[in-house]
Amino acid sequence: MNSWPSDFRPVTVGIGQLAVTADPKVVLVAHGLGSCVGLSVHDDVSGVAGLVHVLLPESEGRVPGEKEPARFGDCAIPALLNAVTKAGADRRKLVFKIAGGAAVLGSANNSRFKIGERNVEAVKRYLKEAGFRCAAEEVGGTSGRTMEVYGGPAGKVLVRTATSEAKEL
Amino acid sequence: MTVEAAEQALGILDRVAIEGAARAERSLTELMGQEIRIHAPQVRIGTELDACEAVGGPDTLVLGSYLSVAGDVTAHVMLLFPVPKALEIVDLMSGQDLGTATEVDDYARSAIGELGNIVGSAFINALADAAKLILHPSPPLVVHDMANALVTSVYAEILQQGSVVMIDTVFEDGNGNIAGLLVVAPDPECMPQILEIVQ
């Protein structure tokens, strides 16, 4: 059940991946975020939008692979900032939104599956350290989410679950 | 876990997987009254994407069950079916005509939970026997969500500690249709212990 019109081109942003677009006919999609976190960024003047799909909060010394620069929260934010500014976004215009960080298996074992919560905390913390804040969020809970980020000046961000319609974040 | 240890673990889990699949196949065939085939399971250092492809892609809505395993070692077991296939299985399990179950209600959830118990136990017992371990599966948690959200949440849990060594296997019914996906993954920190006992 995709939300985008048929003439739009979806770009899947898999685990650890980062994508940037300024094309108003492109939608960046992070499918089925469970404990993972999607962080979007948009600059409405240049129309540049970006999305990262974070798996774990901290790299703890591990170096993310070239194709997965956003695997860890601490590496994801500098990588995203770098990519959108390179694409022409103005650092002062950036608006960030977060989705995901659910505990989809939460009730199975309370001491485990806290990663969703930790991912959200980490992403917000590293965002703050970089001098930004999060403008909107749809996080926590027990349902998986799909996040869609549209390129171009409008820069719409939609979030949907398996059972709910897409809503704008 | 080092790469060598992970590769060694793959070999051992291979044998466990084959035995687990044989046990699960017998239980299911008996239960369903029709032959259910479980493909020779693949044991590998897993990636989340191919796991999701097996049930129809990351956004596919699945119904299934999750068991956490405690005892001498800890592990995760997850059995997932695309919803239409899960409902077919509910009909088969209850001896109803196909098409009787049309929604994910309490009855369907309870049947799929029971199925997770049967299949999960077959694999957990195979592992317990091979490695002479005492293992206790939790009661099944029935899950109904996007495939990717479920699979990656288990992966994230495991990846905190090391590589994911997992058994995943595809189920096939009498008509050769792909039915579902089973993921069995011991916690990486337990692998050295399993290796030591088995050798």
Image: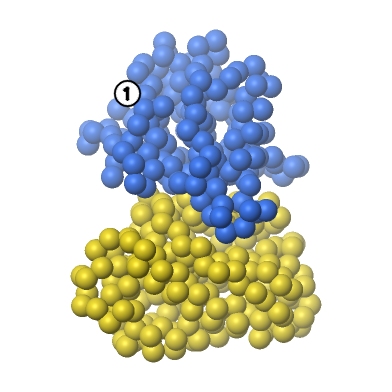
Chain colours: A blue, B yellow
- Left or right, A17 with respect to A154, comes to right
Residue B183 visible? The answer is no
Q: Name the residue under label 1.
A: A24
Kindly tell me whether residue B23 is visible in this rendering. yes
What residue appears at the point 66 percent right and 86 percent down from the top-left corner?
Answer: B129
Residue B76 at what x, y percent from top left?
A: 59, 65
Quadrant where the N terminus of chain A sits is top left
Residue at position x 36%, y 28% in the image: A168
Identify the image quadrant of the C terminus of chain A: top left
**Which quarter of the figure has residue A125?**
top right
Q: Residue furthest front?
A: B106
| Front residue (pair A107, B145) | A107
Q: Please indicate whether residue B99 sits to the left or right of residue A51 in the image.
A: left
Question: Which residue type does callout 1 highlight?
Answer: Pro
Question: What residue is drawn where x is 34% and y is 84%?
Answer: B32
Q: Where is residue B94 in the image (x, y as percent from the top left)?
A: 31, 79
Q: Quadrant of residue B189?
A: bottom right
Secondary structure category for the residue under label 1 = loop
Residue A101 pos. (x, y %): 55, 41
Percent x, y for residue B128? Answer: 66, 81
Total numbered circles: 1
**Is A141 displayed left or right of B179 in the figure?**
right
> The numbered mark 1 sits on a residue in which chain?
A
| Image height of A137 relative to B82, above or below | above
- How many neighbours does mark 1 have within 10 angstroms: few (below 14), some (14-19), or many (20 or more)? some
Q: Examine the rendered structure and indicate whether residue B148 appears above or below residue A119.
A: below
* Residue closer to the observer: B119 or A18: B119
Query: Is residue B77 left or right of B27 when viewed as pictured?
Result: right
